[in-house]
Amino acid sequence: MEDDRIFLDTTRAELPVWLLKCPPAISRVFQLVTSNSFSTTSPVIAKIVHTVDLLHLDDPSSEQFTLEMIQTNPNTPRSYKLNMSKDVAPMCVFSKSNQGKISVEGKVECKFDMEPQNLRAYSNLCRDRTNKAAVKTRKVQVLENDHGMFMRPMPGIVVGQLPSSLKEKRKLAQSKRQDAKRVRMDKGEMLNVLFRLFERQPNWGLKQLVLETNQPQQFLKEILSEICVYNKRGPNQATHELKAEYKNLGGSNNE
């Protein structure tokens, strides 16, 4: 039976360590230098300068830390002010070796936030990073099928033809503009015109009546709802015809 227990080396558990919060550009430098180093000695990437004003030890600002980068990108600021804070949550640093051994490397005593001394250089770095992120990379792809198979329109789509929904919207907008130009008749006069039209033929579509009367469509609908019935099915589907009482009235007028 295999032993699945994990042993944790706590020899350095009480060793005080610092937590450094650094910008991504500096973090990449740290990772790049350490990954490219094959020597037994650790490469010097940066140095920390600790300054103490011995005449004002009671003043918290008398103690200052700065970090000077030795290996860095030419466009990256080299000098940084380290703002120290000891008000940190309890944290420990762990490490894992290539053999899988896990160790506690120490306990976080304080943390530092890096603040660039040369703000102009840092703002230029941020601007360049934003500009690079905004650049759209274009790719050229060679199609395996060079017979134009992928250049053909999908079934049901006609080149140069607008989608049906867009067509309907344009027709509706055009109809509204035309209605706005038409002048309404007097209702009594409009009724006389409609009765004469229904004497000519018993069934009329709404669009036909709009063309015959040159009246706003909504105005016609209101009057037709009073004097007509709308055929929803049958041989005269989608047409209007006079109600029975108006048909009789029309017949008596014709005698």
Image: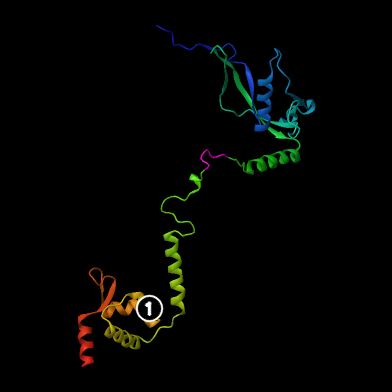
Farthest-out residue, right: 55
- 142 is higher (above) or lower (below) than 238: above
In which quarter of the view is residue 88 placed?
top right
Rendered residue at 58%/11% (across/down): 11
In which quarter of the view is residue 219 placed?
bottom left
Percent position of residue 161, x then y: 46, 60
State which quarter of the image contains the C terminus.
bottom left
State which quarter of the image contains the N terminus.
top left
Residue 23 in sight here:
no
Rendered residue at 71%/13% (across/down): 41
* Start-end of magenta stretch: 141-146
Residue 41 belongs to the span the image colors magenta? no
Q: Secondary structure at mark 1?
A: helix
Farthest-out residue, bottom: 255
Q: Main secondary structure of the magenta part?
A: loop
Estimate how packed mark 1 is, as few (under 14), some (14 to 19) or many (20 or more) residues with alpha carbons within 10 Å: some
How many numbered circles does the render carry? 1
Residue 144 belongs to the span the image colors magenta? yes
In this view of the protein, which residue sits in the foreground, 193 or 160?
Answer: 160
Rendered residue at 63%/19% (across/down): 16
Farthest-out residue, top: 1
In this view of the protein, which residue sits in the foreground, 141 or 125?
Answer: 141
